[in-house]
Image (cartoon, rainbow, N blue to C red):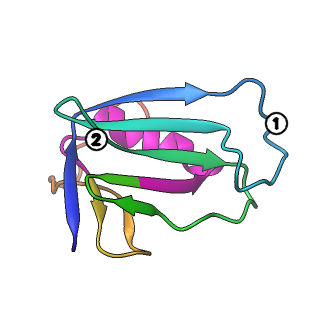
Amino acid sequence: MASTYTIDTYSVRLWSSRRTTELNPGVAVAGIYLYEQGSYRGYAYFYPDGTPLSPPVINPGFVALHYNLSQFAAVSQMLREEKPVYLFEYGATNAGLATGTEPTGEEEGLSG
């Protein structure tokens, strides 16, 4: 069964004690925690580039995503500058973050 959550708040965690050179799929070096109206809906964990990524973890009301560390800036920018942002899952291997539609050429934010 597919699920989509509208993410309206988030928090970021960066671990200072974790090396970005350790390619261990069990040791994330950064995390973004995702909330919908105060309910914890999931997280995006980031692993050093080259780390084999685990598939998403999907439970009722919860989706955990795994990304390479090189994608941290893009995900952070999406959460800072876009609205709405959706956390979705459409099956065991199809989960992620998406934005709503918007006009082209909008030129948001300082990063753009």
Q: Position of residue 80 (x, y in %)?
A: 34, 32
Q: Amino acid at mark 1?
A: Arg
* Residue at figure coordinates x 44%, y 34% from the top left: 111
- Is 41 on the left-hand or right-hand side of 4? right
Q: Residues within 10 Å of mark 2 (few under 14, many from 20)?
A: few
Give the SS element for disc 1.
Answer: loop
Q: Is residue 82 above or below residue 11?
A: below
In this rendering, does residue 26 appear at all? yes
Of residues 96 and 108, the one nearer the viewer is 96
Quadrant containing the C terminus is top left
* Residue at figure coordinates x 22%, y 34% from the top left: 8
* Residue at figure coordinates x 68%, y 38% from the top left: 29
Q: Quadrant of residue 75?
A: top left
Q: Is residue 49 magenta?
A: no
Label number found at residue 83: none
Q: Position of residue 87 (x, y in %)?
A: 29, 53
Segment tinted magenta in the rendering: 64-86
Task: Using the numbered discs, state the Cα–Cα distance from disc 1 to disc 2 in whole angstroms.
Answer: 35 Å
Q: Is residue 83 magenta?
A: yes
Of residues 101 and 32, the one nearer the viewer is 32
In the displayed orientation, state which residue is furthest to the top: 16
Mark closer to the observer (1, 2): 1
* Residue at figure coordinates x 27%, y 58% from the top left: 60
Label number found at residue 107: 2
In the displayed orientation, state which residue is furthest to the front: 60
Q: Which residue is labeled 1 in the image?
A: 19
Give the SS element for disc 2.
Answer: loop
Q: Quadrant of residue 30?
A: top right
Quadrant containing the N terminus is bottom left
Q: Amino acid at mark 2?
A: Glu
